[in-house]
Image (cartoon, rainbow, N blue to C red):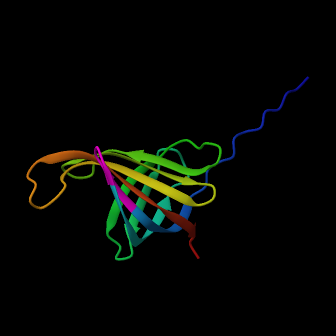
């Protein structure tokens, strides 16, 4: 008797336009602000392919690597530091096209503060298929 197993659905390249609506910085406390930054999100089809977010001006802003898929998730990606003082980051786009992007940084929380703090920066927003 032959048994056929359903193969997982192959991932596809993605081209989305995403709008960041809220950004939060947290160490022991969290502070959030409303923002309106638009990103182009371009994603390769395969696990390990680049995931690149760029601003409307075309400068690269975030870069991750595509991770294996998960139920209810259109895309999940993670990556390491791109510049000094920056740590790991991750992004998830859920199947309803809402996203969360998190990045770890070491920054001064104010211009008067010389003491660097380890923080988590979270950006929340929505995406739509690029036309």
Q: Residue at x 42, y 45 (%)?
A: 78
Residue at 33% over, 65% down: 60
Q: Position of residue 112 (x, y in %)?
A: 8, 59
Q: Is residue 116 left or right of residue 66?
A: left
Report the magenta residues as a range.
23-30
The residue sitting at 54% across, 66% down in the picture is: 127
- Is 12 or 95 nearer to us in this picture? 95
Residue 95: quadrant of the picture: bottom right
Quadrant assignment, res 31: bottom left
Residue 18 is situated, as x and y percent measured from the top left of the image, at: 49, 67
Instruction: Locate the N terminus and report the quarter of the image it occupies.
Output: top right
Q: Nearer the viewer, residue 58 or 113?
A: 113
Q: Is residue 81 above or below residue 61?
A: above
- Give the image location of residue 24, x and y in percent: 36, 57
> Which quadrant holds the C terminus?
bottom right
Q: Position of residue 106 (x, y in %)?
A: 21, 47
Q: Residue at x 59, y 44 (%)?
A: 69
Residue 1 falls left or right of residue 57: right
């Amino acid at each position: 008797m032959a048994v056929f197993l359903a193969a997982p659905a192959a991932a596809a390249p993605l081209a989305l336009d995403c709008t960041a609506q809220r950004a939060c910085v947290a160490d022991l406390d969290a502070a959030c602000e409303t923002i309106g930054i638009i990103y182009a999100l371009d994603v390769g089809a395969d696990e390990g392919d680049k995931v690149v977010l760029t601003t409307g001006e075309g400068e690269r802003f975030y870069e991750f690597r595509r991770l294996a898929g998960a139920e209810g998730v259109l895309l999940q990606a993670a990556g390491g530091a791109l510049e000094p003082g920056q740590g790991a980051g991750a992004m998830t786009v859920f199947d309803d096209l809402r996203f969360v992007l998190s990045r770890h940084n070491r920054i001064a929380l104010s211009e008067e503060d010389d003491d660097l703090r380890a923080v988590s920066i979270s950006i929340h927003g929505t995406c739509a298929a690029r036309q």
